[in-house]
């Protein structure tokens, strides 16, 4: 096997991963959302970054906070210190006593407030991280291999708010009983809860997914991860370079298939799949009757999801991942890649169902940054590896992104348009439905792709050891990191938040033959491609 460039290895790895995430068979249908924005490099995260998803935004007193407070307690002076004896002899000093703070109600409330502030920070960081519109039509096709964000019009929430403000809807009036039914159904899909503003202590209503919606997305995530495991082993068997992959599929295919079917049955029985989709279909149907009422309710949903950041003072819109305990639960699938896979996936294109294009230049190979930022200005390793000695393993999980304030049903309705009389909105489109589409929202992220416990076996390559060493230690403070394509391969990582820039060190091991990164990271996002919108019915003559 000839030596290959790192970019060739990465492109081959991503071709197989793309195949696993999107292609199906009679048991697992092909994914409808098969456009990906890869975060090259990956975004390291930790389990506790998502505490707010399971705990909510109400703080509690945690043992680790009490322990941290006690560890910083000051030693007390006086009786605990021995003095030297006369005549030059000295007695050993007794241990200094520490004054343990009393856990008064005021102190407990302070600890709860600190925990609450941390939860709000977590919610803001996630909301801002996924509040983007991917660029699906970049001329260089780079959007297939790197996180390309469409920055011209702002964030997804900015554009959606603009659409609601600048749109006209069909003029009509619903019967009172239909209005009541819609209100009942909407109450089944989302609920409002009161959240405390830590800045001025006021309470505001925030829209969140209802228990039905949470169950729907939790069971959907379980089904998708069962399907991911099924696809992984099926493709491993089809492209096997090891007999074990074929044996595994031959013996366990029925078990894997039954897991997929059981997950679908569980989604239907306990995840309200049919009910949720019937309610959504009903609301979509009546949108052709009294759009003005529904549009106002959607604007209210958007406002109820608005939260003000603590440090930044700017607004964000509450967004969650479901299930909230994904980082600690099952549902993770092992992905593996070996030399045999390289032969079968080295010439794949990255495409959607509607258009395809070769990934110009391929993915990055091994990259390095001296400052731990996600800037493109970093060094790359241009040596070669023997593909016979290359292997990659990691665990992968798909987690749905839930935005209770974002109503795709409105954007897809045929009963709205941009205000034709407003010069600012005239000629605007959400998506032209092209291949690839263009517009304000040609696509948006629907699922976060998490990976963890990444292990690379590389063999020996001249100069690579020096490359890794320089990447992680040459910069001031040793804040460098290494990346392998869209994956973060260890080191330090800086990221911005409402409290400023923070830096974390993510450990990795390197032994001249391979690398191991045990932490969790966001590798990218699965995105939904928008059809033509707006696409109003030509029969509508009255607009408001």
Image (tube, rainbow, N blue to C red):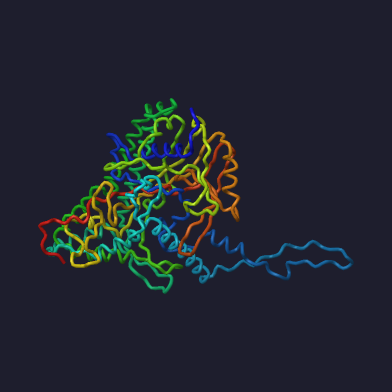
Q: State the residue in front, 40 or 140.
A: 140
Residue 83 position, x and y percent, is 80, 68
Question: In the image, 260: left or right of 97?
Answer: left
Residue found at the very far right of the displayed protein: 87
Percent x, y of residue 278: 20, 51
Q: How far from the left and from the top, in percent, is residue 241?
A: 43, 27
Report the front residue among 540 and 233: 540
Number of dots carrying numbers = 0
Q: Quadrant of the C terminus?
A: bottom left
Residue, far front: 139
Answer above or below: position of 454 versus 147: above
- Report the side of 412 relative to 60 (left or right): left
What x and y, as percent, mark residue 399? Answer: 37, 48
Quarter-of-image position of residue 24: top left
- Residue 128's place in the image compared with 237, above or below, is below
The residue that appears at 26% across and 48% down in the rendered structure is 273
Q: Is residue 258 visible?
A: yes
Q: Is residue 377 above or below residue 292?
A: above
């Amino acid at each position: 096997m000839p030596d290959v460039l790192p970019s060739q290895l990465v492109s081959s790895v991503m071709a197989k991963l793309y195949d696993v995430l999107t292609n199906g068979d009679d048991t697992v249908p092909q994914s409808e959302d098969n456009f990906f924005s890869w975060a090259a490099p990956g975004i390291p995260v930790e389990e506790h970054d998502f505490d707010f998803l399971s705990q909510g935004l109400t703080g509690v007193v945690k043992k680790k906070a009490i322990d941290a407070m006690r560890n910083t307690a000051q030693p007390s002076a006086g009786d605990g210190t021995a003095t030297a004896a006369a005549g030059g002899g000295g007695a050993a000093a007794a241990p200094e006593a520490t004054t343990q703070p009393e856990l008064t109600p005021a102190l407990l409330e302070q600890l709860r407030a600190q925990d609450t502030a941390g939860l709000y920070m977590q919610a803001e960081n996630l909301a801002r991280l996924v509040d983007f519109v991917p660029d699906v039509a970049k001329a260089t096709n780079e959007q297939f291999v790197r996180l390309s964000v469409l920055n011209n019009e702002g964030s997804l929430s900015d554009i959606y708010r603009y659409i609601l403000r600048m749109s006209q809807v069909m003029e009509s009036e619903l019967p009172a009983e239909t209005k009541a039914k819609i209100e009942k159904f909407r109450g089944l899909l989302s609920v409002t809860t009161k959240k405390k503003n830590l800045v001025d202590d006021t309470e505001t209503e925030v829209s969140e997914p209802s228990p039905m919606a949470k169950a729907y997305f939790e069971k959907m995530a379980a089904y998708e991860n069962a399907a991911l495991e099924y696809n992984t082993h099926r493709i491993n068997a089809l492209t096997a370079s090891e007999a074990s992959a074929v044996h595994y599929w031959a013996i366990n295919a029925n078990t894997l298939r039954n897991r997929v079917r059981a997950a679908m049955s569980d989604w239907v029985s306990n995840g309200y799949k049919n009910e949720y989709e019937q309610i959504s279909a009903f609301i979509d149907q009546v949108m052709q009757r009294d759009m003005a009422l529904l549009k106002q309710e959607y604007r209210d949903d958007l406002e109820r999801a608005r939260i003000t950041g603590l440090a930044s003072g700017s607004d964000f819109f509450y967004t969650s991942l479901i299930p909230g305990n994904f980082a600690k639960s099952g549902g993770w699938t092992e992905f593996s890649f070996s030399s045999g896979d390289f032969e079968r996936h080295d010439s794949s294109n990255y495409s959607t169902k509607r258009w395809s294009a070769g990934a110009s230049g391929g993915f990055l190979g091994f990259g390095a940054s001296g400052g731990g930022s996600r800037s493109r200005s970093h060094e790359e390793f241009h040596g070669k590896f023997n593909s016979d000695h290359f292997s990659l393993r990691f665990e992968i999980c798909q987690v749905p992104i839930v935005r209770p304030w974002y109503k795709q049903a409105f954007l897809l309705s045929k009963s709205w348009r941009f205000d034709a009389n407003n010069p600012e909105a005239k000629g605007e489109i959400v998506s032209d439905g092209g291949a690839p589409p263009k517009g304000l929202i040609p696509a948006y992220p629907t699922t976060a792709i998490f990976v963890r416990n990444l292990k690379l076996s590389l063999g020996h390559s001249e100069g690579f050891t020096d490359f890794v060493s320089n990447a992680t230690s040459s910069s001031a403070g040793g804040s460098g990191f290494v990346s392998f394509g869209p994956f973060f391969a260890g080191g330090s990582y800086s990221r911005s938040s409402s409290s400023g820039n923070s830096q974390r060190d993510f450990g990795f091991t390197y032994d001249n033959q391979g690398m191991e990164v045990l932490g969790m990271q966001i590798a990218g996002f699965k995105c939904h491609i928008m059809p033509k919108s707006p696409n109003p019915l030509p029969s509508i003559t009255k607009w408001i």
